[in-house]
Image: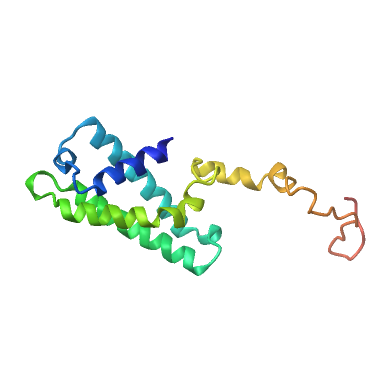
Amino acid sequence: MYADLFWNWLEKVASPSADVSRLASFSPEYLRMKDYLRAHLVLLGELKDNPVMMENKKDMEVLVSLYELMMQFRTTVSIIGSMLDKVTLIVLSKKVLSRRSKIARFLYKPDVWKEPEDDWSNNSQGAVNSGHGKAKENNKGMKNKGGKKGKK
């Protein structure tokens, strides 16, 4: 799975024996992981800006913290050459990994990785009626502005 590759890569970077010099190159692995990081940042940013999915304030704090850490990580990974700081990468990787279990339920819900325009389809009649019979139909006629009942 796409997400598993990202987290496995972070675990490798968090290892003290990791060879971070490869991160300074433009290897296919580096470019792929940079794309995964970017995709996670976009998703975290959208979740952060749309807090409807958050159950409580603590969830939002974890999400914002993870977003900020991943931004720092991206900046650190973007440094090319001998200036790449292995210790900083390890520390940031471990911090990001420590928040994974707290935020995974938001990041990996089946509908989270949809294209933005797909979100509008969640308001369709089919999505509304998929509430397993919890919604009740209004059988009363509609009243017009004059107070008289009209056709449904």
Give the colouring mode of the picture: rainbow
Tell me which residue sits at (7%, 46%) in the image.
Answer: 82
Quadrant of res 12 = top left
Tell me which residue sits at (33%, 55%) in the image.
Answer: 96
Q: Nearer the viewer, residue 114 or 32?
A: 32
Q: Position of residue 115 (x, y in %)?
A: 49, 40
Q: Where is residue 65 in the image (x, y as percent from the top left)?
A: 36, 62
Tell me which residue sits at (22%, 52%) in the image.
Answer: 90
The answer to whether residue 35 is left or right of residue 111 is: left
The answer to whether residue 139 is left or right of residue 59 is: right
Badge count: 0
Question: Which residue extends farthest left?
Answer: 82
Quadrant in which the N terminus is drawn = top left
- Compared with 147, 130 (above or below) is above
- Compared with 127, 96 (above or below) is below
- Compared with 46, 111 (above or below) is above
Tell me which residue sits at (30%, 41%) in the image.
Answer: 9
Question: Which residue extends farthest front?
Answer: 17
Question: Which residue extends farthest bottom?
Answer: 57
Q: Which of 112 and 91 is in front in this view?
A: 91
Q: Position of residue 35 (x, y in %)?
A: 32, 39
Quadrant of res 31 = top left
Q: Where is residue 51 in the image (x, y as percent from the top left)?
A: 51, 61
Q: Nearer the viewer, residue 95 or 148?
A: 95
The answer to whether residue 151 is left or right of residue 80 is: right
The answer to whether residue 127 is left or right of residue 66 is: right
